[in-house]
Amino acid sequence: MNVTFVFLSNPPIALLVVQGELDLGNRDQLVARLAELRELEVDVLYLDVGHVTFVDCSCMSELELARRRLLRAGRRLELVAASPIFLKVARRAHYPELSATGQATRLPTPAAARWWSFVVETSHRARATAAGWLSGIAPKL
């Protein structure tokens, strides 16, 4: 039931890094993070679930619902990293878009002049993962 969310945004893009276990016990946290993303109205949400160690169908369903909502709004969700267990559950639950890792191999350079971040819940490892994704792409301030 341990989960960590790190969220970084620079419209028109955002990155959500999820680590740990996604299950019914923390589904509400996931739903809240996804709702915050909808409010930002970013064009592309990059999702890094490379360090997810467990995911149940309720959370997978919420991620698919979020993907579909973004798509209906003319936006998209791109999976940039996924753990083997995440991919296995996505495939077995028949969510091909959530099992298509590698759609985005590198985050694009942000268009905005300043990079800002909002960390919801974080751990040292999550910070390091997010920093790894963002290294070299944030503009010099």
Image: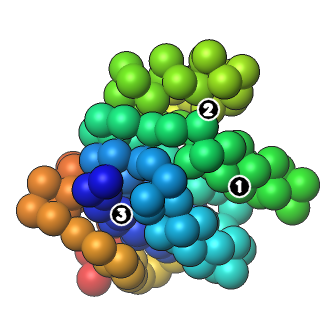
Regarding residue 106, the answer to whether it shows in the image is no
Name which of mark 3 and mark 1 comes first in the sequence: 3
The x, y position of residue 35, in whole percent, is 64, 73
Q: CA distance from mark 3 to mark 2?
A: 18 Å
Quarter of the C terminus within the rendering: bottom left
Most extreme residue toward the left is: 124
Most extreme residue toward the front is: 25
Mark number for residue 5? 3
Hey, what amino acid is under mark 3? Phe
Which quadrant of the structure image shows residue 125?
bottom left
On screen, residue 1 above or below 32: above
Hey, what amino acid is under mark 2? Leu
Residues packed near mark 3 inside 10 Å, few (<14), some (14 to 19) or many (20 plus): many
Q: Which residue is mark 2?
A: 98
Label 2 secondary element: helix
Tag 3 near tag 1, CB within 8 Å: no
Hey, what amino acid is under mark 1? Ala
Q: Residue at x 35, y 63 (%)?
A: 5
On screen, residue 110 above or below 89: below
Label 1 secondary element: helix
Residues packed near mark 1 inside 10 Å, few (<14), some (14 to 19) or many (20 plus): some
Quarter of the N terminus within the rendering: bottom left
The x, y position of residue 128, in whole percent, is 14, 55
The count of marks equals: 3
Which quadrant of the structure image shows residue 126?
bottom left
Q: Residue at x 53, y 24 (%)?
A: 89
Give 111 or 128, whichever is nearer the viewer.
128
On screen, residue 83 above or below 126: above
Regarding residue 53, the answer to whether it shows in the image is yes
